[in-house]
Every structure is written in C-alpha cells, then in structure tokens.
Amino acid sequence: MEHYNIDQKIQEFMADIEARNPNEPEFLQAVKEVAVTVIPFIESRKEYSGMKLLERMAEPERTIIFRVPWVDDKGQIHVNRGYRIQMNSAIGPYKGGIRFHPTVNLSVLKFLAFEQTFKNSLTTLPMGGGKGGSDFNPQGRSDMEVMRFCQAFMSEMCKHIGPETDVPAGDIGVGAREIGYLFGQYKKIRNEFTGVMTGKGLAYGGSLIRPEATGYGVVYFAEQMLKTIDEDFNGKTVAVSGFGNVAWGVIKKVHELGGKVVTISGPDGYIYDEAGITGEKIDFLLELRGSGNNRAEDYVKKYPEAVFHAGKRPWEVKCDVAIPAATQNELDLDDARNLVANGVICVTEAANMPSTLEAISHFVEHKVLFSPGKASNAGGVATSGLEMTQNSIRLNWTSEEVDARLKEIMIGIHKTCRDYGKEENGYVNYVKGANIAGFVKVAEAMLAQGIV
C-alpha cells in the first residue's frame, strides 16, 4: 500500500508540473527523472513533510526573456530572443552557461537550469543553478557579427547578473571568443572588472585547464565507478560521442589512463577508428572543432584508416565504457540495448541528459554502472567555481593545482553519490544517489532561509 501511495504522489506531482509547464518536454523529462528518486526520499524524512521543496525547486526564482536586435555585415537587421533562467540561489549566486543555438527555447534552458541546481550542489562549492542563451546561431557568422550580437545580448543581460548575483559561463555555441565579447561589454557598461563570467581567457582572469575540465572530470568520475567493481581504464575500449571540448578532454584523459577511445561523432554520423584516437589525432579534434562545420566525416579525410558511418550513432560499437558527450537524448532505448548486448560495463554521461529515461532504466535494470551528467560532468562547473575563487583572491593557480583540486572534487562527488545510491544488493544506483545528494544540500539551505 505504501508503494502505491509513493507512486500516486509522484503521479500527482508530475501532473501539477505538466499543467504548469505545457509544451516543455525537455524540462518535464528532467523533473521526472529527479522526482521518481527524490519523492520517496522526501516521504521518508519528517522534516521535509509539507514544505513543498521539490515543487519550489522546479519553479524558477526568475525567468528573464528579452529581445536581441543586431545588425549583420550587410546592414540587415536581425531579431533574436535572449533568455536567463535564474533557477535557485539557496546555496550561492546563480551559476550556469550561456548557449547560442537555434534549438534554444524555454524548455531546454529550464531543463538545463534545473539540472544545474543539483550539479552545482554536488560540487560542494557555493553556487546556485541558472542557465541562459539565445536562438542565435554563430555558425557561418563573421567575428564582427558575433561581436555585435554578443554586445547586444549583454546590453540587456548585464542588468540581471554580477559576481554576487549570477555568474554565467560558456556552453554550446559560446566559446572563448564569445565569452571575451560578452565580458568586454559587461565591463564597459558596468565600469567594473569583476569575476562575473567564467571560461575567460587566461590574459583576463581565466583558469588553466578550463577547456579540458569537464572531460577530465568525467573520466575521474568513471575511474571511481570502475574501482567499485575492481576495474580501471587500462586496456579498456571506450566509445565517445561528440568531438567538442568535452569529448576532447575525455579522450585525452582516457588515453593517459591506458584506455583506447575508438569513436567520435557529429550531426552527420560517427567515425570508428580501430587503432584508437591517440597522439596527433587528439590534437586534430581541436582543428575539427575550430573549423566550424561540425562534420565528423572530416576526420576520415585526414585519417583514411578510420571508417565513417553516416547518419548513425556510435552506440552500436562493442565497447567496455560508453561516454555520451554530445547533446540531450542522443542515447535511446535501442542504443542501450545494443550497448548491454555488446557487454558494456560502465556508461558515464558527459553531456546534459544525453540518455532517455527508457535507456537509463535499461542500464539500471541490467546492473550496468550508469552515472547521470549532473554528477559525472560536474567537473566543468567545478572548475568554473575554482576560477571564481582565483578571481576573488586575485591569484592564478598552476595547471597541476587546478587539476588536483578538480580530481579531489570529482572523487568527493562520487563518494556522496555512492553513499546515497548504494542498494541492498550492493549495486550503486548513481541516478538515485546523485539526485538525493544534490537535493539534500539545496533543501537544507531552503529550509533554513524560510519560504522565499
């Protein structure tokens, strides 16, 4: 009967969320993934009873939507839409990236901001959850057009952010170039040089190893997962999707730990390189990324011994470890079945919500080690937090210092997720562990601060 009551509470909670947030599938998916593990935990804790904590966490504290008019190189006027979702500030200033991509909408950014709240909580650093962006597409635009757009975007957003309020970073479509233009405009309008953005260039307050940090953190987390079954990366075959900064960092660190990455992917399909992506091939990924055409097939032009599979995803390749590092919902139930049938032992998310709920259930059901991105890809925002610290103390740490702190944070996140996620049969349910661990810190802060 008790189990029925819990299921009923989850259904009632989701029905209310769906009614309040219609036509927002990504956001609803993210909330449901948390609700099914956190609501049973809430029901087991008397101090949480009636406090509507998850309901409050699922409602942004502030949603800012604004017009971004800008002029292209031909003098044509364009109008884009800008967003900033300030989700939760219970444990610190809002913290989360800015994404420039045609797929950006309210649902996508709310899902990312909701996930970010839990992810930032897991890092143990004082950072709340936020996310922002625009449906502007920087692909094919000149530097001057990107600069004019960034300046127009920041002219509005600067009213809502600050080092003690909201500290944005980069994300898809927002790299070092865009961060520079955004920071420059903020500094000009506000007449202050502060640590308001992270992912900055080293010359003006950035942190060493920030571009690699997310990928490095994912591999440190996966390394800890493998240790729970007395395994490591040495000699393991690894399938990776994407070929951006995250995939690049993952591949570098897997190679360093003795594993062999055999795939990368883009919107056009995936490549399989049986010999492994090592040495100059890893460096070539930066060239691919910088070319701006987003085509994985170009790898095969440079290294013809690799095979390109048009329109497919890499999850049909036999591997020991799978690391989805591209985008949301890129790994579905069929992909999960393929991976399990091919003997995968560990799936570690490097992107935000790359696996569908059905895929996650399949991994958990078959006792595959599976980590959600809110835990395993927290290394990027953790290093952003370290950049904020360096900005505050007006000092720069060495690569080794930042890397050591990053590894320490990822080991700590893993331990917390393992402790909350360990089941009676010994299996570690990292989805449950990450959701509950992330929830607890935010919940305790919210309880202490009253109904605000």
Image (cartoon, rainbow, N blue to C red):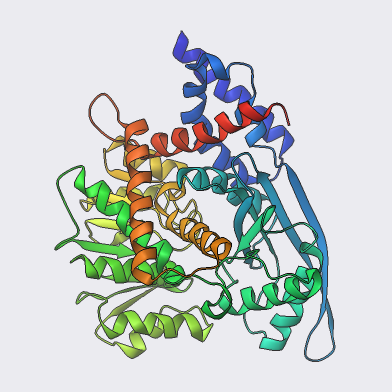
Outermost residue toward the top in this view: 1
Residue 241 vs residue 228, the one in the foreground: 228
Asked where in the image residue 415 lies, by quadrant, the reply is top left
Q: Is residue 206 left or right of residue 220?
A: right
Q: Position of residue 118 (x, y in %)?
A: 52, 42
**Looking at the picture, how far across and down is residue 341, in whole percent?**
23, 49
Is any atom of residue 239 visible in this view?
yes
Whether residue 345 appears in this view of the structure is no
Apparent side of residue 425 relative to residue 188 in the rendered image (left or right) = left
Which residue appears at 63% of the width and 65% of the height?
197
Residue drawn at (55%, 69%), measured in percent from left and top?
199
Image coordinates of residue 260 in percent, x first then y, are: 21, 68
Q: Nearer the viewer, residue 19 or 257?
A: 257
Q: Quadrant of residue 451?
A: top right
Residue at 39% of width from left, 53% of height from top?
A: 349
Residue at the image point whose x is 70% and y is 71% from the top: 136
Residue 414 coordinates in the image, percent (x, y): 34, 44
Horizontal arrangement in the rendering, residue 2 relative to residue 334 (left or right): right
